[in-house]
Image: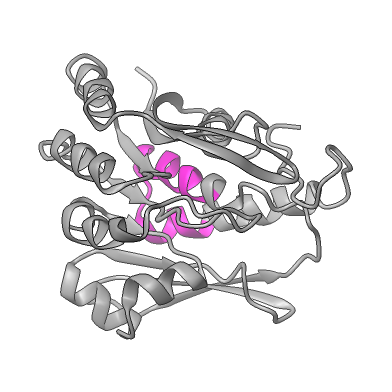
Amino acid sequence: MPQTALSIAGSDPSGGAGIQADLKTFVDHKVFGMAVITALTAQNSHGITGVHPVPPEFVALQVQTLLSDMPVNAIKLGMLANAGIISAVAVALKEFQGPIVLDPVMVSTSGHALIAPNAVQTLVSDLLPLATLLTPNLPEAKLLLDGAEPQAFVEQFGVALLLKDGHGEDQVVRDVLYQPGLPQEVFMHPRIKTQNTHGTGCTLSSALAARLAKGQSLSAACEGGIAYIAELVATSATHSMGTGKNGALLHGL
């Protein structure tokens, strides 16, 4: 039986992020991918023009129906647009025993808000206790940690934290993994100047879920997942699909 991974996230019809990127990433990692859609979006390389959240009870029904039948080795959580959806997902996953990668999707590459402001606390209170790994970028971490030091945060909540440096300015990207009771690990690679970064967060978190589904340790999954995304950004750096500023990653090409 193949390893499997489930993405619970929003749909991106342009194919660069969300469910579409997650499923492509699962294929790249040779795991069987499944998907629960939490929201429909209207978007292209210029940005997002609309978001239509799925009713929370139907999100929960998708998860419950799937888990009652299919083996799931790991779960990636992406766009969860409001507090109702977050709570519904938390209830539906309360008995799940495998690794959960929580990507706190809050703002799109183009600057569009992807989570209601009042939902952040619900994410921390309801979903964080279920997560194995949290993968915020620098702006998301500032909001979630609320002034706390990363190591203190992971010790308090008992969750690992991969602090992504994609929004940094240095010539070298330094992603840092914090784990409870362990020293931090730093993963470095050259920063590539490109606008084709749409979907990097979704892709990395789904790569991590796929690697955890295959039994890798958190450290090995982060090392391999970061190397995967760095190569993908490099190979996608100069394409010209779309007329906007937010070009997609070219998964599998």
Horizontal and vertical percent for residue 95?
Answer: 10, 36
Residue visible at 25% across and 82% down? 152
Residue 193, located in which quarter of the rendered image?
A: bottom right
Horizontal and vertical percent for residue 99?
Answer: 27, 45
Q: Main secondary structure of the magenta part?
A: helix
Query: Dividing the image into 4 quarters, which one contains the C terminus?
Result: top right
- Let me know if residue 103 is in the magenta part: no
Q: Looking at the picture, tell me which residue is in the foreground, 82 or 149.
A: 82
Q: Looking at the picture, tell me which residue is in the foreground, 83 or 67.
A: 83
Q: Looking at the picture, tell me which residue is in the foreground, 231 or 67.
A: 67
Q: Is residue 165 above or below residue 103?
A: below
Residue visible at 16% across and 40% down? 97
Horizontal and vertical percent for residue 120?
Answer: 31, 60
Residue visible at 42% across and 44% down? 79
Q: Which colour scheme is used?
A: one colour
Residue at the far top: name it: 69
- Let me know if residue 220 is in the magenta part: yes
Residue visible at 44% across and 63% down? 136
Residue at the far left: name it: 95
The magenta span reads 204-223
